[in-house]
Amino acid sequence: MEKDLNLAVLIDGDNIPSKYVKEMLEEIAKYGNPSIKRIYGDWTKPSLAKWKDVLLKNAITPVQQYGYTTGKNATDSAMIIDAMDILYSGKVNGFSLVSSDSDFTRLAIRLREAGMTVFGIGERKTPDPFIVSCDKFIYLEILHKNTSEESTAIKKDKNSSVDKITPKVVNLILSTIADVEDDEGWAFLGEVGTLLQKKQPNFDPRNYGFRKLTPLVKSLDQIEIGSRKNPKGNGNLIYIRATS
C-alpha cells in the first residue's frame, strides 16, 4: 500500500475507548498522512468527558452530534455524511474508519468503489462484515507498546490477548505461498504478505504475538525459509516455501 496517502481519520467517539488514541494515530501514520482528523459524538454526555485532553494533544477536531431520537445512532449518520462530503471534496485518497460498529460496512464498501483505500480500526468484537469491507483492518488491542525493543514477539499481558496459530491460519499461509510460488515452490515473502492482506484484511502478525511476518513464518515447522540476492540493490530478499 502507498505510504503517501492523504487520509481522513474519522472516529466513532461513542464506540472507541480514548486510551487507544495515541497508538492508533501512530499506526495510521505508517500508511499515510492523516490530513483530516475528526471524532463524532454527543459531547454533552459525561461519558465522553475523558476525551478532552486526548483531542487537544492529538489535534483531533470534535464534531458535536446530538442524539435526536432515542434508540437511533445519530453519530453514525453524521460520520457517514461527513465521509461522503470529504470524498467528493477530492482532498484525500484514503480513509481510516475507527469503529467497532458494523453500521459502517456499507460506507467502507462505497468508499472503495470510489477508488479510496480504506483502513478499518476497531476492537476484536468488530463484526466480520465491516472487517472484510476494508482494505486492511487493525485491532486496537494489538497497538499497545512493547517495552522490549529487541523482542520480535509481543508480550502478552492481562489487558491484551494473543490469538493461537490454528491449522486454519497455517493453511491460509500455505495456500497463499502456493498462489505465488515459482517452479521450485519458493515465494517472495513480501508478495505473500500482500496477498494475505487481500485475502483476509484483518490478517496481522501482531494478532499472533509477532511484530512482523518473518518471525511468524519462522515459528512454523511447515514453512522453510531461504534468501536471494536483491537484484535492485544491496541485501537479500526473504523467500519461503512449504516443507516437503
Image (tube, grey):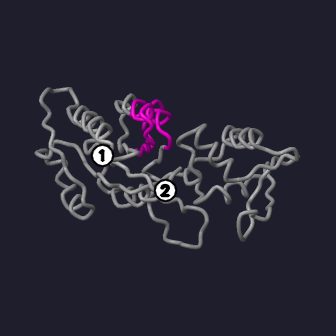
The answer to whether residue 42 is above or below residue 219 is above
Q: Position of residue 109 (x, y in %)?
A: 43, 31
Provide the residue span drawn in magenta: 108-136
> Position of 6 compared to 76: left or right?
right
Residue occupying the point 38% across, 52% down: 6
Q: How many angstroms separate mark 2 from mark 1 (CA)?
A: 21 Å
Kind of residue sitting beneath label 2: Lys
Q: Label 1: which residue?
A: 11
The residue that appears at 20% across and 56% down in the rendered structure is 50
Q: Is residue 205 left or right of residue 39?
A: right
Does 22 lie within the magenta span? no
Q: Say which residue appears at 58% left-offset and 60% top-offset.
A: 211
Q: Nearer the viewer, mark 2 or mark 1?
A: 2
Disc 2 secondary structure class: loop
**Disc on res. 3:** 2
Q: How many marks?
A: 2
The correct choice, above or below, for 76 with respect to 184 in the image is above
**x%, y% of residue 167?**
70, 40
Amino acid, disc 1: Ile
Give residue 198's position: percent from left, percent from top: 58, 39
Instruction: Give SS at disc 1.
Output: strand
Image quadrant where residue 201 sits = top right
